[in-house]
Image (cartoon, rainbow, N blue to C red):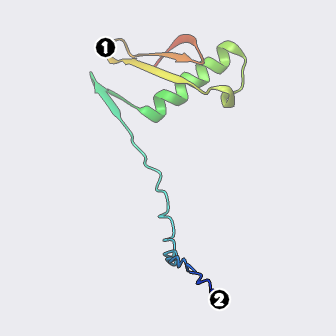
Amino acid sequence: MATKKKTTEEVVVTETKAAAPKKPAAPRVKKTVTVTVQFGGKEITTEEATTSAVAAWVAETGKKKTEAKDIKLYIKPEDSVIYYVINGESGSVEF
C-alpha cells in the first residue's frame, strides 16, 4: 500500500512599514549676546573688550589674530583693565 506524505508549508509574512517622510531640518539661528560693563562713568562691551585684548595679544606676540582660538577675558572696571588669557598666554590692556 502506498502512503502519501503530507507536507506542511509555512508562509512567513513580514510587514514593512513605509518610512515616514523626513521633516526638513529647522534652520540654525546664531545667537548674539552682548554684555556691557558699566562702572564709574565708563562702559565697555564684550565685543570691544575682545577686540582690544586680541589686538594687544597680536602686538605682544606677533601672531595673527586668526590664531587666537581660546580667549578668556577678565574685566576689572575699577582699574579700567582687561586681563586676558589667549591660547594660554596672558596679558592685559587698559580700556
- Give left or right: position of 1 versus 17: right
Q: Residues within 10 Å of mark 2 (few under 14, many from 20)?
A: few
Task: Tell me the quadrant of the picture where the C terminus can be found.
Answer: top left
Residue 33's quadrant in the figure?
A: top left
| Disc on res. 23 | none
Which residue occupies 71% across, 26% down? 64
Residue 25 visible: yes
Element class at badge 2: loop
Q: Earlier in the sequence, mark 2 or mark 1?
A: 2
The relative height of residue 29 versus residue 41 in the rendered view (above or below) is: below
The relative height of residue 3 versus residue 92 in the rendered view (above or below) is: below
Q: Position of residue 75 (x, y in %)?
A: 39, 19
The amino acid marked with disc number 1 is: Glu
- Give left or right: position of 5 versus 34: right
Q: Residue under circle 1?
A: 78
Q: Residue under circle 2?
A: 1
Q: Position of residue 58 (x, y in %)?
A: 66, 20
18 and 68: which one is in front?
18
The amino acid marked with disc number 2 is: Met
44 and 4: which one is in front?
4
- Give left or right: position of 38 versus 91: left
